[in-house]
């Protein structure tokens, strides 16, 4: 369940069309060209510099979304925001929504308003729509209904079968 300060207003979340995949490498390259001397650094020192207000721009992976409080942070951008939805993991919807809600909650935590930019392959996906609408509870209710209808966990069980062998024709 989201804490009140992690809830976003619908106008605070903006979806951007995906123009080029590449994770954080693309933005890192672009910033390196614009800001001489910028580049990757050890996360511990970066976190200290952020809390001392010595850094104005942070480009990182999921690690910067986890449990940090940056009082002056007003803008969060997520590249490939819906990447976690690919791959067929049954928990992908709730995990992706939770992570994106958590990272969105980093912006505008104090007196300054925050804004969130999400770059997406599929802006119409229910997770993206729920983030824009601020309706995580509705998303989880729909996910539960869908799982119950399909008799998927927690309303049913799944089994994994692993077939292995040294010759593909024998397995």
Image (cartoon, helix red, strand yellow):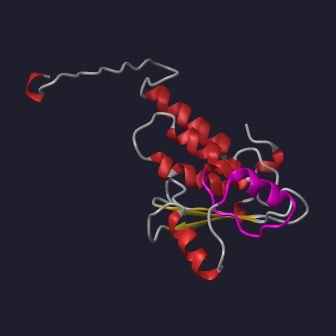
Please name the residue shown 53% across and 32% down the image.
145
Please name the residue shown 57% across and 80% down the image.
33
Expressed as whole percent of the image width and height from the top left, the position of residue 147 reads 48, 30
Does 81 sit above or below residue 95?
Answer: below
Q: Which residue lies furthest to the bottom in this view?
A: 34
Please name the residue shown 83% across and 65% down the image.
113
Q: Quadrant of residue 34?
A: bottom right
Expressed as whole percent of the image width and height from the top left, the position of residue 63 reads 65, 48
Residue 170 appears in view: yes
Q: Viewer-proximal residue, 41 or 112?
A: 41
Q: Viewer-proximal residue, 162 or 113?
A: 162
Expressed as whole percent of the image width and height from the top left, the position of residue 160 reads 35, 21
Query: Quadrant location of the N terminus?
Result: top right
How many discs mark residues in the rendered view? Answer: 0
Does 24 sit above or below residue 154?
Answer: below
Q: In which quarter of the image is residue 27?
A: bottom right
Instruction: Give the residues drawn in magenta, as a range.
Output: 41-61
Does 157 sit above or below residue 90?
Answer: above
Residue 134 appears in view: no
Q: In screen coordinates, is 115 left or right of 117?
A: right
Q: Is residue 2 magenta?
A: no
Please name the residue shown 49% across and 58% down the image.
124
Query: Quadrant location of the C terminus?
Result: top left
Q: In screen coordinates, is 105 left or right of 124?
A: right
Expressed as whole percent of the image width and height from the top left, the position of residue 5 reads 83, 49
Q: In screen coordinates, is 161 left or right of 116?
A: left
Does 146 sit above or below residue 59?
Answer: above
């Amino acid at each position: 369940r989201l804490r009140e300060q992690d809830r976003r207003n619908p106008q605070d979340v903006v979806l951007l069309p995906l123009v080029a995949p590449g994770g954080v490498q693309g933005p890192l390259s672009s910033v390196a060209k614009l800001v001489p001397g910028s580049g990757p650094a050890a996360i511990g020192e970066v976190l200290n510099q952020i809390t001392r207000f010595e850094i104005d721009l942070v480009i990182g992976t999921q690690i910067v979304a986890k449990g940090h409080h940056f009082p002056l942070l007003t803008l969060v951008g997520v590249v490939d925001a819906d990447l976690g939805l690919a791959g067929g993991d049954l928990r992908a919807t709730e995990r992706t929504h939770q992570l994106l809600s958590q990272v969105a909650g980093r912006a505008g935590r104090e007196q300054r308003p925050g804004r969130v930019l999400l770059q997406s392959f599929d802006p119409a996906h229910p997770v993206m729509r729920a983030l824009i609408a601020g309706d995580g509870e509705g998303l989880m209710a729909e996910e539960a209904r869908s799982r119950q209808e399909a008799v998927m966990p927690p309303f049913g069980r799944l089994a994994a079968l692993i077939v292995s062998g040294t010759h593909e024709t024998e397995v």
